[in-house]
Amino acid sequence: MKLTGIARWALVLTVCQATGAEAPAQVSLTSGSILGTVRDASGAVAPGAEVAARHVETGLVRRAIANESGNYSIPQLPVGAYRVSAALAGFKTAVVDRLVLEVNQRARVDFVLEVGAVSDHIQVTADAALLETDTSARGEVIDSHQVEELPLNGRNFLQLALLIPGTVEGEGSRQEDRTGVAVSVNGLRTAENSYSVDGVDSNDNLNNFFTLRPNVDAIQEFKVFTNLYDAEFGRTAGAAVNVVTRSGTNRYHGSLFDFHRNAALNARNFFNTGERKEPFVYNQFGGTFGFPVVRDRTFGFVEYQGLRSRRGDLKRGFVPTEKMRRGDFSGISRTIRDPLAGSAFAGNVIPAARLDPVAQKVLEFVPLPTLAANPGGINYSAFQKIVEDRDQFSIRLDHRFSSADSVFVRFSSWNQHRVLPGVFPTPAIGDSALSTSGEESREAVRNAAVSYTRTLDRRTLNEFRVGYNRNHVDRFSLYGDHNWAGELGIAGPANTPRESLFPRIAVSGWTTYGAAGFLPNLRVVENLQLADTFSLVRGNHTMKMGLDARHIRLDGFFPPNLAGNFGVSGRFSGDAMADFILGYPDTAAVTKVEDYVRDRTIWYAAFLQDDWNALSRLTLNLGLRWDLLRPPEEIRDRKAVFDPALGRLIPVGTEGIPRAGYSTDWNNLGPRFGFAFRARRWMVVRGGYGLFHSSQTLNTQNNLGRNPPWQVNLTATSNPQQPTLDFVRTLSGGNEQLFPTANGVSRNWRDAYTQHFTIATQYLPARNLMIEAAYVGTRGVALPVDPNINQPTAGSGTIQPRRPFPDVYSTILILLPIGNSVYHSMQLKAESRLARGLGYRIGYTLSKAISDSEEFSSGFQNIYNRRYDRGRGNLDARHRFTSNFSYALPFGAGHRLGASWNGIVDALLGGWQAVGIVTLRSGFPFTPTVPGDPANVGGSNRPNRLAAGRLDNPTLARWYDPAAFAIPERFT
C-alpha cells in the first residue's frame, strides 16, 4: 500500500501517541506553565515537595515533584486562574490562592516552607507577576478584560495588537480590508505573520492573511509574539499571533450584546462640503453561553455574532467636463497638439470627426462634474452605499476522560457578503487613489480543531492536534454580466458570462474607468494540519519536541486583465484626457486564461526546545527548528518556467525542471538562543538571537501557472513618437503586435530567513508597575522579489527593441531570493496591573527600517542598479507612542460613595469605568513620481531630488515643496 506524505506523517504521529514515544510538533500553543523553586525557611532547597495546581473553574489538578535542586515545572496547563500549593512532610502547606496563568506564559511561583504540620496552611503571594523571569521571547498577552473592555471599531480584536511596541499598521491595512487591519512587527512584512486559533493554523496561505476572526466575547486571551519566540513557533519570521477561545466551566455563564451605531453623532466627512451627512447604520449583535455538561468533566461553549451594516461612502473623483467630452479644451492653459500632424489644434478644440467612438461610448457611463474643481483635482462626489453582512458561529466541547486524558473539539463558521461600490453608480464603476473600485464578494471560512492531551506521568506529557482551515472567496466586479467590450466596440477580450467586465481605462490624473484587475477572483484555500508535541521534565530541563505537517490546497482563478486594460498618459497630445478623447492609449493589455490553477503542497516542521535552569537565577532558552517548505505543484502540471539562458519557457517536469518549477530548500535550520537572568528580585535582564525561516505565499509561488499556453497575458506599447495603438483593434492584434508576459524562478532557490536579536531589562519599581527598556533588531535576507529582467533600457523610439529579450516577450518576472531588510529600534514599555481601579500600558518605539524591496511592489524600478531602491521602507515609522488605560469609577457597591445604594440604583449608577486608547506616530515615507515616462521605458519614473523639500508651514494642498524635485532629462 502506498501512502501519501501527509498519510505517512499521520501514521507516525498515531504510533507515537499510542506508545507514548517522544514524538515531536506544536505545543503549549493554547496553554502555559507554572514553575519555580521550593525552599525551607533556612534557604535550603526542598527536594521531594509536591506542588499541585488546581484550575479554579474546571477542577483540573496537575502535580509535580521538586527535584534535587528544589525546582519544579508543570507544563501545558490550560489558561485561567489556579490555586497552587506546595506540600512536604514536616512542613506547613504553602498556598497561592489565585494565580492567573496566561497563554504561553512561564509563571514563576517560588515557595518557602515553614516547619509544621502538613494540614496547616500558610498563604503565599506570587511576587513579580509582571516580570518575565524565565523566557527571552518578546510578546504581549492581551487578556479577556482588555479584549472586552477596550474600544474596538467593529469589535476586531486584532486592532489591540497595534498597542504593542514595535508594531505599525501594515500595508495590508490599506490594500486588504478583509480582516480590517494588518500588522507589521519590527520592520517585517505583514505576510510574514502567522495566525493560529486554539493552536490550529488560521492563515489564508494565498496572501497569508488572517481568516478566522473570533467574536471578542469568545476569546479567553491572545498573545502576539514579536521577537525571539520559541522553536515551537515557526514557518514565518514576523508576529506569531496565538488566540485561545473560551471554554465552558462548572458555572453557567453567558452574554448578550447589541452594538448599534448611526450617523446621529458622526462628524461630517472632511471632503463633504454639503449639509447632508453620510448615511450610516451599523448593527453588531450576538451572544455567548458556557455551561457544564458533566461537572468537573465535560464543558461546552457556544457563540454567535452577526453584523448588518448599511453606510454611505462619499466617493470622490475627477471627471471630464461636458465641453471636454466634445473635444473642447479651450478652458485649460496647456496646448493640445494633433498627434498625427504635430501642430496645435485650433483653439484647443479637437474636431468632431476626430473624436474616438469608443471613448464617446465610455463617457456615456461617466457622470458629469458635481463640484467646482479644487487644487486636489476633485470635481465629482456622490454617496454610494456599502453593504456588509456577516454571520459567525462557534461551538467548543472540552472533556476530561480521567486525570491523565483530556480532549477538546471546536468548530467555527464565518460567512460574509459585501458590496463595495465604485466612484460612479454606473457600469464604468470608477477607481482612483482615493477610493476602491466596485465589487461584490462572498466569503466563507470553516475552521476546526481537535486536541488530545495525555499525561504519561508527572514529568512527561503528550499532545496530539488535528486542524482544518478552509477559506472560500468569490469576488466579482459590479455590472459584470454584460458583453461590455462588444458594446463599446473593443475587440479581443473574452465575453463569457463569467468574464464580461467593463474594460479598464486608466487616464493619468483622472478617475480610472472600468473593473479592477484580478476580477473575477475565485479561490478556495484549504489547510489540513497534523501535529504532535511531547513534553519532558528532567532535572533542571523542561524540554519539548514536536512534529508538524500541513497539506495545503489552492484552487484559484484570478486573471489580471480579462476585460482589457488601457493606459493613457498624454504623451501624444500633451494632455491625458485629450489623448483618451482621440483614442490613443500608450499601453494595452489583455488576459486569456483556460482554467483554475490547482496547486498542492505539504509543509513539514520539527523542533526541539530546552528551557534550562542553568543557575538559580539564570534560565537558558535553547531551541532548534527545521522547516521543510515544499513549493506547490499544479496537479495537471500546467506550469512553465522561463529560462534566461535559453530565452524561452520550459514546461515543468521536462528538461530537468521539477514539477513545482524549482527545487525544495532543505537547509532551513533555525537555531535560537535566549537567556533570562534574575539580577534582583525586582529586575530581570533577558535577550538572545535566533534564525527564523519564512514560507512564501501561494500567490507569489503560483506565478508559474500564469504562463502560456494556460494563461496568456498579452501587452502592447505604442511608439512614443507616433500613436500606434487604439481602443478598437489593439487587443485583437489588429494594429500592433501583442507580446506575452512570462514568469520564472531562480534555479538556486533559497527560502527567506530573518535574524532576530534583542537585549532588554525589566524593572519593578512598585508591586503593580513594571518598566522595560529594550533594543530590538531584525535583518531579513533572501526575501522574495520578482523583478522584470526584460526591462528596456532608457532611450528613444519603440520600447520593445530595447529589451534584453525583444523578439517574443514583454515583461518577464523572475522570482529571486535577493531582497534585504534591516531594522533597529529602542522599545520602552510601562505596565501597571489593576490597582485601586486603574490599569494601564504605555509603549514608545524609536526605530528605523531600511529595505530594498517592498511587500506589495514588483521588483525594482531599475533592474540594472538595485541600489536606487534601498532606503527607508514603506513601513518606517520613526516614532510611535501607544497607550491604553482602564479606570473603574469609584462609586457603587464596594466604594465609599454608593456603598448603601440598593440593587437597582447600583445596577444603573455603579460599576462604570473609563477606558481609552491613544496612538501617535510619525508618518510613513512616500516616493514621488513624475508625470509621463521621460525615460521611455513603459513605466513610472522618479524625479531627481534637489533639496529636502520640507516647508515651514505646510498645508493640505502643499505639504512639501515640489520645487525640491525635478523631472529627469529625457531618455535617462
Image: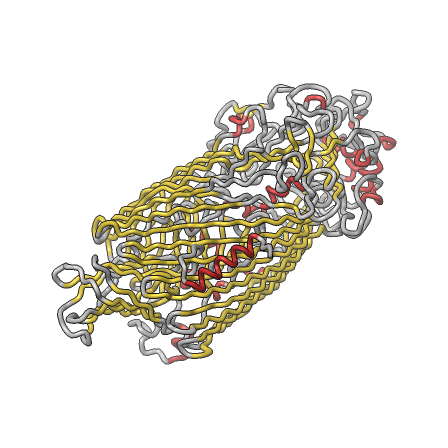
Q: In the image, is residue 863 above or below residue 823?
A: above
Residue 773 location, x and y as percent? Answer: 31, 45
Q: Quadrant of residue 944?
A: top right
- Image location of residue 825, percent across then percent down: 38, 39
- Report whether 607 appears left or right of 564: left
Residue 251, by quadrant, is bottom left
**In the image, 809: left or right of 35?**
right
- Residue 773 visible in image: no
Residue 19 in sight:
yes
State the quadrant of the N terminus.
bottom right
x%, y% of residue 157? 48, 58
Would residue 722 be found to the left or right of residue 893 on screen?
Answer: right
**Is 379 drawn above or below residue 65 in the view shown?**
above
**What residue appears at the point 60 percent right and 54 percent down from the top-left corner?**
2
Q: Nearer the viewer, residue 336 or 548?
A: 548
* Residue drawn 73% across the image and 25% down it: 807
